[in-house]
Image (cartoon, rainbow, N blue to C red):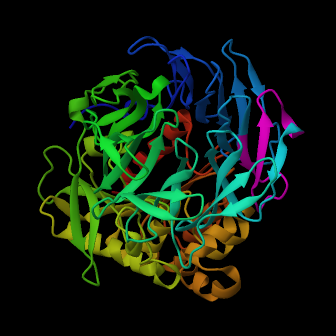
Amino acid sequence: MYDYDLERYLNVRSAYGASVSPEGTLAFLMDTTGVGQVWTLSEPGAWPDQRTFYDEPVSFVDYSPTREELVFGMDEGGNERAQLYRLDEDGRVTDLTAMPEAKHRWGGWRPDGEAFAFASNRRDEAVFDVYVQDRDATGDEAELVYEGDGWFTVNGWSPDGQHLAISEAHSSFDQDVYVLDVATGERTHLTPHEGNVRYVSVSWSPDGDALYLVTDERSDTLSLARLSLEGDLDPVRDGDGWNIDGVAIDQDSGRLAYSRNVEGYNELTVGEFDGPTAVEEFPAPDLPGGLAGGVAWGPEAEQFAVSVTGRTVNTNVFVVDAESGESERWTYASTAGIPQETFVEPEVVRFESFDGRQIPALFSLPPDAPEGETPVIVDIHGGPESQRRPSFAGLTQYFLSRGYAVLEPNVRGSTGYGKAYTHLDDVEKRMDSVKDIRAGVDWLHDHPAVDPNRIVAMGGSYGGFMVLASLTEYPDLWAAGVDVVGIANFVTFLENTGEWRRELREAEYGSLAEDREFLESVSPINKVERITAPLFVLHGANDPRVPVGEAEQIADEVADHGVPVEKLVFDDEGHGISKRENRIEAYTRVVEFLDEHV
């Protein structure tokens, strides 16, 4: 075991979310101050300049294509009502949107750098419209160019700056893509289809006569394809049974990078177009960690910046030579003095569930785990349209250093394993995914290192629901539960979640109008008398996704039944605990709770 305290592990820094200026300056987010702020670098390994100084985390940064200025986004207290700001080269900050009651979703700079686009629900909280705004305009000076009737996202400008690619999400697994004429407001639908089809990671072709995207229109997994402006879809690359996660294209050079998700790790391919659907591949990038994303092309596309992470590699920004694949680390986010060689790499495992299906998971054992005496944290991801991937996690490494093993299952409904797998938990199949958790615990019982009487369920958001459902469905399996911003009651959750989210969430869970009885039947709050394991409930008061009432009702009900409960709510947090000082307080309390009960 290693004698570093929790605060040290939670002080491991991350540098990520890069953007490159026309002159080659690297901007990125780094959480040295406790939350992600904007920093810049002009050369690798130099001391970076901090450019923003807020108490709230910055969500993204994007350099202008023509000036040494950038736009960044930030909300207040985790309420997800992001505002857009311009940061000039001299450090001046301009509030571009100044409508704190509305959400603003960045859509990119126009190629000439004189304007930008975004989607916002400022007209109607439940829907997103498309706006274009001059770079020096503010507040209500944005032009409404398309009045939406659903969840619209701006994917980017055509090379001539006259059109926008926009997407409409009907659910997490069903989207439509359109081209919008900015001057006339005319919208052309490119993806009419039946059933659920994903069209994501949309980019314009270099000549502007098509879009490139990843889609599962013709297969179980996501593939890279070319979509003409007439709606014809032509394959470019498939993932050989795995998803292609996304594509980043440099419009001037025709160079591109795309990633393939293999068992949660990714393989990055770099090349250039040699025809509409032909790609000449360059040597694979030389990068550590196993996960790389957020490609940002530099001037002339000779290089690109990318965020690199792994379970034993904290997140940093590398710059890769496109043609050779050689990489250079630019940022040096600290490991808080903890030797990297002490971090534990997980093993990819599979266990058989109730119907014979093999469920993938990451499993990590602490060093020198004693036979039959090792406690385990079953850490369940949210979403459910998500996937636990082996990125760096200071809290996970702390638990491993304290002698806990960690099982991270990708139960049915997770992404990364094909379209059919993601739909195995839809609506009436909801509890099948909870049965997968039971199967994972059975697998742990057969592991020679594990103490079957000291197994903990922990998860956030939808993973919090999974924790509560596991405690109610299989109460004898658990020594304790940790519910972070979780759903206790699907009815009150859907009634109180942000209006812009309700329709999307009903597509996954079932609708209040048609499925209320079923939603009540699977809500842990209605089976709370079955919970016997001590429970820790953690939430943010400003959570717009899973309102804090979910935490309050489950904590009160469990306590009324005489079960030990601890509840911790942060007034300045939303859907998750993002500020480092809050994370230290929260997880110090969680560790003390587990030390007492496990």
- Can residue 207 be seen here? The reply is yes
In the depicted structure, whether residue 132 falls above or below residue 447: above
* Residue at (51, 40) in percent of width and height: 583
Task: Give the mark count.
Answer: 0
Residue 113 x %, y %:
68, 28
In the depicted structure, whether residue 592 falls above or below residue 127: above
Residue 392 x %, y %:
35, 40
* Residue at (28, 75) in percent of width and height: 439
Along the viewing direction, whichever of 561 and 430 lies nearer the viewer: 430
In the depicted structure, whether residue 427 falls above or below residue 582: below
Q: State the extent of the magenta-drawn residues as a range.
A: 117-140
Position of the N terminus by quadrant: top left
Q: Residue furthest right?
A: 140
Position of the C terminus by quadrant: bottom left
Q: Quadrant of residue 412?
A: bottom left
Residue 162 x %, y %:
71, 43
* Residue at (15, 64) in percent of width and height: 447
Q: In the image, 418: left or right of 169? A: left
Residue 120 belongs to the span the image colors magenta: yes
Residue 171 x %, y %:
59, 68
Q: Quadrant of residue 525?
A: bottom right
Along the viewing direction, whichever of 314 and 585 lies nearer the viewer: 314
